[in-house]
Amino acid sequence: MSEDQVRVEVAYGELKATFSGSPDEVYTTVSRFLAQNLPQIEIAKKVTLRYDLKDLVESFGDYVKITDEGPRVMPSERLSLKQRIALQLVAARIAYLLGKTKSDRLSLQELGSALGVATKSISSRLSELVKAGNVQRASDETGTAYSVTTLGIKWLLDTFSGRARPE
């Protein structure tokens, strides 16, 4: 590349592009590229609901911990059983994203053991959470297991902020 050439790499989320040429050409094409793509990205962000590891830890770090015994919900008398189940599944998701477990799903027995609650009580609340779309049920050759959905995470955040009833 000659001395009067400029090379610029632009990365914004998953969007990446490289521009090279004279300073004026690169300035013009980078400006045009950003003007065309950033509004679309910002619009997409407004309609996309997604929680990554950082979001989960920031939102639920006071309620869940990853221990030597596995992911756990910290005791709180103020939480309903539904909230505790959803939190336990969030803790399982965090542990999975951290590479501490092989799956973000928990069986009914694992939920009962982690929460210290009879599986019959958990089963009833799980059915309600599944029906509401807050938890997903998956069955395979090893049995049935549950994971929190994106809507379940939103529901949990909304109940904590008072925007939704804990049910």
Image: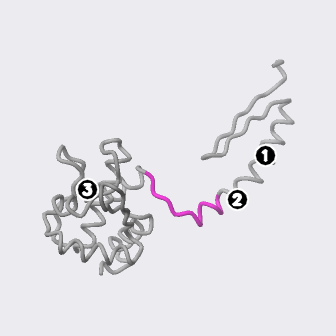
Element on which disc 3 rests? strand
| 156 shown above or below 63 | below
How would you rate the neighbour count of disc 2 (Cα within 10 Å): few for under 14, some for 14-19, many for 20 or more?
Answer: few
Q: Amino acid at mark 3?
A: Val
Closer to the camera, 68 or 112?
112
Q: Residue furthest front?
A: 141
How would you rate the neighbour count of disc 3 (Cα within 10 Å): few for under 14, some for 14-19, many for 20 or more?
Answer: many
Quadrant of res 123: bottom left
**Region in magenta:** 42-52
How would you rate the neighbour count of disc 1 (Cα within 10 Å): few for under 14, some for 14-19, many for 20 or more?
Answer: few
Closer to the camera, 22 or 65?
65
Quadrant of res 3: top right
Residue for point 81% across, 36% down = 26
Image spot of residue 63 (x, y percent): 25, 59
Residues at marks 3 and 1, CA–CA distance in whole angstroms: 44 Å
The residue wearing badge 1 is 31
Q: Amino acid at mark 2?
A: Gln
Residue for point 59% across, 65% down = 46
- Residue 105: within the magenta? no
If you read the primary sequence from the N terminus, does the residue marked by circle 3 or circle 2 appear first?
A: 2
- Residue 47: within the magenta? yes
Q: Residue furthest top?
A: 2
The residue wearing badge 2 is 40
Image spot of residue 68 (x, y percent): 18, 43
Q: Quadrant of the N terminus?
A: top right
